[in-house]
Image (cartoon, grey):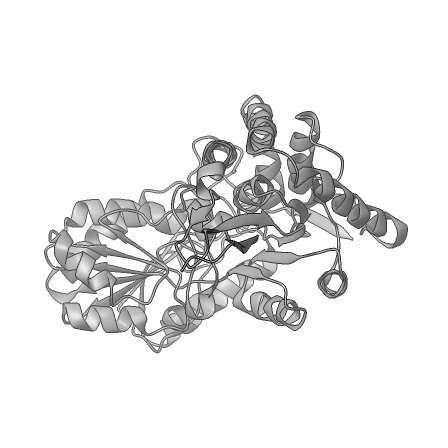
């Protein structure tokens, strides 16, 4: 059973039954059948559908954002932005997929030799609750434009969001079976990966979940893309614009109530400006408004689930007991819903809980570094490697430092974000493969070498 709860009130929402037996078998067969015709369509035909889906979404932004607000507590203004970013992703791949997948001529002893990029078949997308629309579209837009079909297994806590996504495709006139929502459990995921319909898997989620699914896919020799957890460092150097850094890192930390893999999780500040930065950061964090996510003035909504809130609070309490100072928040509020206050922990050291573990909520962690070299050392002292940022007046220095940062993407004097035009993904325990940009669309294709004779002497 898929069961959502309104995190702003604790109210149980409509349940959705699991897909089993004949219903699931029918969905898989529909995906296989749709692939046989979809793979033969032109890029122009595929683009036409994706643009129609984007049109449907653009005409219904408020209603679609409202579903996310109800199910997982996303502030409604952030929901508007997520829907618009998702339809941008659809339009981006509609416009650029043909160029991204153009055949590549490679000289050899052949009369002509080249690599062409062909679809693989039905691809399974396993998605989390924290960005229901965006994560679905960064999976499905490139996958569909490459000529594959999509089987979406969304998180059990956002079933109405998943239904809304596939309904957008239906309203746009998508062929039956092209983009489907599967309400299945972990055991059924394993069965799909061991079967012969699913040809690849994309997962966004925890490192533990990614490791399990990667093992299943590897056993069957099926390609996979895994975007997993992060404990992203932001290095604020002594010559940085502290006001700008504090402003942007406040936004980075509290988007979606801090429930984002690429949020700034460890702010590592060089000693000469440590106290000044902490004061500026505290002022900005303290001004944020927490409240009803349906209110357009709300900047920080609730945590998605009570168990996640309790886990976050435990991380905060342990870190304080280990010697960190709590300058804001750190207490569980009374009343309905799963709210957690914006919390600022300073003087955090690498062995403390909030530095060792990923914190998924509005908890800002500030650490002091004696030098640029130590800041870099602290930044890399983590099993994760998703994203990082560097703040300094010397951009060339930051670019040199980026080469030493163990992260899949680095922002210099700006916010870490995902962009349809640029590849995104992590290293170490943060994942395998890339999404978005030209790299992402090539993850689920057959890079087929074609050698045309006779041989040249």
Q: Please indicate whether residue 29 sits to the left or right of residue 331 in the image.
A: right
Nearer to us in this view, 382 or 176: 176
Instruction: Kindly give the residue lying farthest to the top in the view shown.
Output: 59
Percent position of residue 85, x then y: 46, 35
The answer to whether residue 46 is above or below residue 342 is above
Name the spot of residue 30 as percent of width and height, x first: 79, 43
Q: How many marks?
A: 0
Residue at 47% x, 31% y: name it.
95
Tell me which corner region of the image, top left, top right, bottom left or bottom right, holds residue 320: bottom left
State the image quarter where residue 37 is shown: top right
Identity of the residue furthest to the right in this view: 22
Answer above or below: position of 130 versus 229: above
* Foreground of the two, 329 or 304: 304
Q: Is residue 322 left or right of residue 399?
A: right
Q: Is residue 233 above or below residue 153?
A: below
Judge by depth and name the residue closer to the eye, 46 or 206: 46
| Residue 291: x %, y % from top left | 48, 40
Instruction: Locate residue 185 relative to residue 292 in the image: left or right.
Output: right
- Counting from the top left corner in percent of width and height, residue 446 is at 57, 54
- From this viewpoint, is residue 89 visible? yes
Quarter of the picture containing the C terminus is: bottom left
Q: Is residue 275 visible?
A: no
**Residue 201 appears in which quarter of the rendering?**
bottom right
Which residue is pictured at 55% across the width and 27% down the height?
A: 51
In this rendering, would 278 be left or right of 75?
Answer: left
């Amino acid at each position: 059973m898929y069961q959502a709860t309104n995190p702003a009130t604790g109210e149980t929402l409509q349940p959705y039954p699991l897909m089993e037996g004949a219903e699931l078998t029918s969905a898989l067969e529909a995906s296989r059948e749709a692939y046989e015709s979809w793979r033969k369509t032109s890029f122009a035909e595929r683009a036409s559908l994706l643009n129609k889906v984007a049109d449907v979404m653009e005409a219904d932004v408020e209603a679609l954002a409202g579903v996310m607000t109800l199910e997982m507590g996303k502030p409604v203004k952030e929901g508007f932005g997520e829907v618009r970013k998702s339809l941008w992703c659809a339009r981006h791949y509609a416009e650029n997929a043909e160029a991204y997948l153009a055949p590549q001529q490679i000289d050899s002893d052949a009369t002509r030799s080249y690599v062409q990029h062909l679809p693989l078949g039905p691809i399974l997308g396993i998605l989390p609750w924290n960005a229901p629309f965006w994560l679905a579209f960064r999976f499905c837009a490139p996958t569909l434009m490459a000529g594959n079909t999509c089987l979406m297994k969304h998180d059990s806590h956002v079933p109405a969001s998943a239904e809304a996504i596939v309904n957008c495709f239906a309203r746009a006139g998508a062929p039956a079976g092209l983009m489907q929502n599967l309400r299945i459990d972990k055991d059924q995921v394993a069965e799909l990966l061991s079967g012969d319909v699913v040809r690849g898997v994309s997962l966004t989620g925890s490192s533990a979940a990614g490791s399990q699914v990667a093992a299943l896919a590897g056993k069957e020799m099926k390609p996979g893309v895994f975007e997993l957890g992060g404990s992203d460092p932001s290095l604020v150097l002594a010559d940085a614009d502290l006001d700008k850094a504090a402003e942007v890192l406040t936004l980075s930390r509290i988007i979606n109530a801090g429930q984002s893999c690429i949020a700034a999780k460890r702010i590592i500040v060089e000693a000469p400006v440590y106290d000044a930065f902490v004061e500026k950061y505290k002022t900005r964090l303290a001004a944020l408004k927490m409240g009803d996510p349906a209110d357009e003035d709300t900047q920080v909504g609730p945590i998605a689930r009570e168990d996640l809130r309790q886990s976050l609070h435990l991380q905060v309490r342990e870190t304080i007991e280990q010697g960190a100072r709590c300058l804001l928040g750190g207490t569980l509020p009374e009343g309905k819903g799963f709210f957690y206050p914006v919390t600022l922990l300073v003087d955090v050291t690498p062995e403390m809980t909030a530095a060792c573990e990923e914190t998924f909520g509005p908890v800002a962690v500030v650490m002091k570094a004696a030098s640029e070299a130590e800041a870099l050392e602290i930044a890399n002292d983590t099993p994760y490697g998703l994203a990082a940022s560097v703040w300094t007046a010397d951009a060339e220095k930051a670019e040199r430092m980026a080469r030493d940062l163990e992260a899949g993407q680095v922002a210099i004097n700006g916010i870490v974000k995902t962009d349809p035009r640029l590849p995104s993904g992590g290293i170490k325990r943060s994942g395998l493969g890339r999404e978005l940009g030209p790299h992402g669309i090539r993850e689920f294709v057959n890079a087929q070498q074609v050698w045309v004779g006779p041989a040249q002497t």
